């Protein structure tokens, strides 16, 4: 129904466009903006949404799936291994120390059955990866101690979802077996085998299938096709996982990890990123829209005390763990408040439990309401921390913790980016590598990328003229960019993007020839290198030598000539603008050649080589 | 009015020379001192003669700061001298552009002061090794001051390095002062001795 699709689009996007800027302006973060927008368009305020929001939730949950794919892409198996201590130490203790008390409270306090108590405990131990990562990114806290620790905890939770989701059917079958209702669709063992087979399949595909596939697509050289391929991978894996009754999030996360070492990582990242952002936004909006205010009105105190209780418990547990991890006080408070909400995975876990009839409708609605409200409160907690708690300690977070992240965790911290790794760019890269300077290389020829990676170069497939690709390559932190791209139009786009978005990034530009160099100077570049200048003069030097000239004199003449030519280039480049700008390219080329030759004549006329010249001395002595 | 000082630094491997770095740091903030790192400008030995000459004309006192290799200054300094001090400009019948300007060498060396004496193992003083430089300056009509020398650079403690740098600064302040009389200095072998 196109009508409904369009109206939903207008409602959702409209809400985001109105409320997110307001929230940003107020300094409370975009997540709260989306949530507020959702509440406003929801059934209890404007009533734009009434039915079908379940389906929107499903579509929007896909944002979470994509987010996990992107997280996976950031973590190759090696860096996962390097982070194992903090993931296991911080993450596991957080999971257990939160899940066990919650489960006990549910079992004895709320009289839940054992499986139900386990499910709720595990669900409520989850924090919101979406909210926290978004917050860290927006507030620039990713590199603080609290940010690193929070990331480790979230990672363990994300991974833990997988066994938890596998546990639910097992517990459900246990229940059913007790009730002698063993009409489960599959037996436990065969489903476990299917799951293992599919996981192995994803592993193998990630290692052996997807890279050649992407190379093949890259060779077609159509951007939208690559985007389609990226989406295909994510959606395909998700579909596969769902069809065997597993978490799509887990599958895409795994696929992401498998592709983290791939040459196509940056390109995949930048293709999926906008979709993820949009869908997460819709997800948060949908969360806001599905808050059941009726339920809230019926049991206000029960729900609110649950919310307060869970946030309080989570924050205390986190603070204790943070204390053991030697976080400083301000960092520890941030760490505790960052992760104190119940996250989106709680929906997934609770929903699965409901599907397997472990949870009834009423407790399910109640628990999701608790989850939603705690998520809505989360930005406010941080807001309070930022405005009142943190200043009270008089410490500025990011400035005070100049932590050096290890290179494994921060793969894009190279000071130099080389765009284009053909004959020219690769010489530059090899020279820099020989002198211990690490570079991030971007190239859009998939065959070449493949070859160079086999030879041990760190090369990524990507269109360096795109803002998101540059960002993924670390342009924000890099010092300079060497541009050796052949396509002239692309070079112009690249310079434009860099000047607009990364003004700190110095550009070292390879120019094809004199005219191209003029254009580059016109763009305000300082470091422009004509690719034939030194080689052609070197040929001249060797010719002089084979005609009987002395080497050192020939070399000096060459140096002198190059200096003269560089000066003439800058001079003529400025004069060029006084002339008619509409001369044809070819004509201009000839006109330029004429001017260059005229400059040469001037140079020959005034030049005198007095170095080690005894003629004037002889004249004077006679 | 202070003299306008041009400090010509000649060091082929400045990045590893702690002593030369601390000497330079001690004086680079003086407002009348301009530091000219020559190896940094001409790594290819392709000295831009006109540019260098213009720079010389703008200053009154030239300090050549350099290490001592094989009892001499580094090769670019000789190249620079050969190219910049042109006949007809710096010397010769019409060459008077540098007349009345002052020159001094600030030398760093691993040898101790006692080694650089007629009885020592190097058999000559630092000043004697610099005779050619002195004569070049005289030929160009310049006043050549005794050298400022930092000895024993390979075994210096941090404190010794700092005090050498302090002495360098005091020396430059003193020599560039309008009241300073070069004849007074002519009798002491090192400018260092004048300050102590």
Image: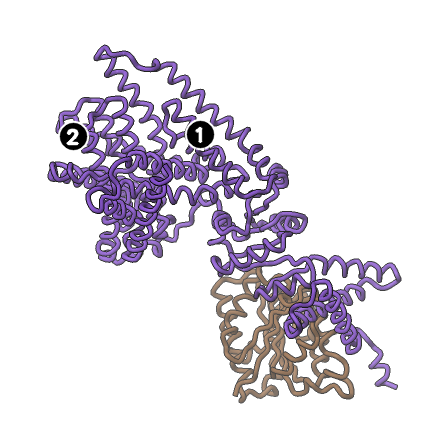
Chain colours: A purple, B brown
Q: Secondary structure at mark 1?
A: helix
Output the chain of dot 1.
A
**Residue A420 place in picture, x, y as percent:** 61, 49
Nearer to me, A289 or B124: A289
Mark 1–mark 2 distance (CA, rounded to whole Å): 37 Å
Q: Are marks 1 and 2 on the same chain?
A: yes
Q: Report the residue marked by disc 2.
A: A105
* Residue A259 horizontal side relative to residue A195, left or right: right
| Crowd around label 1: few <14 · some 14–19 · many ≥20 (10 Å) | many
**Residue A314 place in picture, x, y as percent:** 23, 39
Output the chain of dot 2.
A
Residue A40: tell me if it is visible: yes
Q: Is residue A124 above or below residue A478?
A: above
Q: Report the residue marked by disc 1.
A: A237
Nearer to me, A20 or A54: A54
Check the image and name the residue furthest to the top. Answer: A180
Q: Is residue A357 above or below residue B35?
A: above
Q: Secondary structure at mark 2?
A: helix
Q: Is residue A115 above or below residue B132?
A: above
**Residue A188 place in picture, x, y as percent:** 34, 15
| Crowd around label 2: few <14 · some 14–19 · many ≥20 (10 Å) | some
Among the 4 quarters of the image, the one containing residue A57: top left
Q: Residue at x 22, y 56 (%)?
A: A388
Q: Quadrant of the C terminus of chain A?
A: bottom right
């Amino acid at each position: 129904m196109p009508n409904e699709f369009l109206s939903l689009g207008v409602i959702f996007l409209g809400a985001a466009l109105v409320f997110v800027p307001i929230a940003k302006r107020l300094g409370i973060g975009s997540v709260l903006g989306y949530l507020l927008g959702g509440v406003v368009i929801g059934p209890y305020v404007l009533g734009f949404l009434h039915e079908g929001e379940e389906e929107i939730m499903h579509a929007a949950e896909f944002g979470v799936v994509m987010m996990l794919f992107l997280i996976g892409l950031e973590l190759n198996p090696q860096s996962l291994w390097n982070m194992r201590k903090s993931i296991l130490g911080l993450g596991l203790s957080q999971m257990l120390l939160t899940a066990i008390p919650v489960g006990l409270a549910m079992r004895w306090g709320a009289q839940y059955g054992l499986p139900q108590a386990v499910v709720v405990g595990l669900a409520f131990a989850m924090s919101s990866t979406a909210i926290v990562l978004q917050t860290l990114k927006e507030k620039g806290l990713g590199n603080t101690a609290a940010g690193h620790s929070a990331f480790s905890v979230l990672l363990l939770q994300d991974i833990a979802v997988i066994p938890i989701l596998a546990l639910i059917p097992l517990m459900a079958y246990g229940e059913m077996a007790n009730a002698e209702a063993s009409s489960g669709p599959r037996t436990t063992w065969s489903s476990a085998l299917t799951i293992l087979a599919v996981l192995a399949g994803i592993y193998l595909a990630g290692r052996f299938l997807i890279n050649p596939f992407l190379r093949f697509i890259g060779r077609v050289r159509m951007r939208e096709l690559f985007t389609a391929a990226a989406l295909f991978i994510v959606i395909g894996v998700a579909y596969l996982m769902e069809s065997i009754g597993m978490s799509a999030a887990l599958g895409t996360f795994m696929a992401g990890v498998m592709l983290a070492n791939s040459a196509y990582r940056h390109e995949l990242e930048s293709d999926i990123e906008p979709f993820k952002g949009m869908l997460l936004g819709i997800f948060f909006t949908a969360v806001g829209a599905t808050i059941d205010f009726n339920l809230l009105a019926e049991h206000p105190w029960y729900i609110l005390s649950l919310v307060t209780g869970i946030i309080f418990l989570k924050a205390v547990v986190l603070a204790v763990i943070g204390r053991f991890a030697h976080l400083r006080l301000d960092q520890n408070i941030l760490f505790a408040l960052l992760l104190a909400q119940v996250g989106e995975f709680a929906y997934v876990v609770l929903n699965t439990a409901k599907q397997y009839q472990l949870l009834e409708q009423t407790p399910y609605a109640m628990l999701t309401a608790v989850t939603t409200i705690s998520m809505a409160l989360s930005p406010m907690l941080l807001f309070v921390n930022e405005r009142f708690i943190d200043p009270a300690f008089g410490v500025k977070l990011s400035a005070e913790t100049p932590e050096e992240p290890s290179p494994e965790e921060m793969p894009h911290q190279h000071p130099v980016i080389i765009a284009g790794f053909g004959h020219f760019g690769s010489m530059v890269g090899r020279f820099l590598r020989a002198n211990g300077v690490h570079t991030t290389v971007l190239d859009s020829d998939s065959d070449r990328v493949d070859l160079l990676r086999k030879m041990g170069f760190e090369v990524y497939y990507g269109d360096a003229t795109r803002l998101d690709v540059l960002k993924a390559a670390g342009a924000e932190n890099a010092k300079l960019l060497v541009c050796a791209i052949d396509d002239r139009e692309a070079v112009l786009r690249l310079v434009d993007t860099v000047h607009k978005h990364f003004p700190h990034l110095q550009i070292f530009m390879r120019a094809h020839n004199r005219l191209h160099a003029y254009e580059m100077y016109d763009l305000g570049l300082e470091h422009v290198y004509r690719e034939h200048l030194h080689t052609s003069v070197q040929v001249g030097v060797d010719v002089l030598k084979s005609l009987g000239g002395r080497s050192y004199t020939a070399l000096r003449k060459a140096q002198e000539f190059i200096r003269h030519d560089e000066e003439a280039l800058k001079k003529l480049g400025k004069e060029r603008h006084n002339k008619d700008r509409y001369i044809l390219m070819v004509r201009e080329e000839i006109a330029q050649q004429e001017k260059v030759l005229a400059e040469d004549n001037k140079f020959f006329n005034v030049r005198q080589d007095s170095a080690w010249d005894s003629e004037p001395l002889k004249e004077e002595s006679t | 009015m202070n003299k306008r000082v041009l400090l010509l630094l000649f060091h082929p491997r400045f990045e590893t020379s702690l002593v030369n770095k601390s000497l330079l740091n001690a004086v680079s903030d003086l407002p009348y001192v301009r530091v000219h790192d020559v190896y940094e400008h001409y790594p290819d030995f392709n000295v831009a003669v006109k540019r260098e000459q213009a720079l010389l004309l703008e200053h009154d006192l030239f300090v050549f700061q350099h290490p001592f290799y094989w009892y001499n200054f580094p090769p670019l300094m000789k190249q620079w001298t050969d190219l910049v001090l042109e006949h007809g400009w710096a010397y010769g019948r019409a060459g008077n552009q540098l007349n009345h300007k002052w020159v001094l060498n600030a030398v760093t060396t691993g040898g101790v002061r006692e080694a650089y004496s007629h009885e020592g193992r190097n058999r000559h003083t630092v000043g004697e090794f610099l005779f050619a430089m002195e004569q070049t300056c005289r030929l160009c009509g310049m006043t050549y001051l005794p050298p400022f020398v930092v000895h024993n650079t390979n075994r210096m403690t941090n404190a010794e390095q700092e005090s050498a740098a302090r002495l360098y600064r005091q020396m430059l302040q003193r020599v560039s002062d309008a009241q300073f009389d070069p004849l007074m200095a002519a009798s002491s072998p090192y400018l260092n001795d004048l300050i102590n």
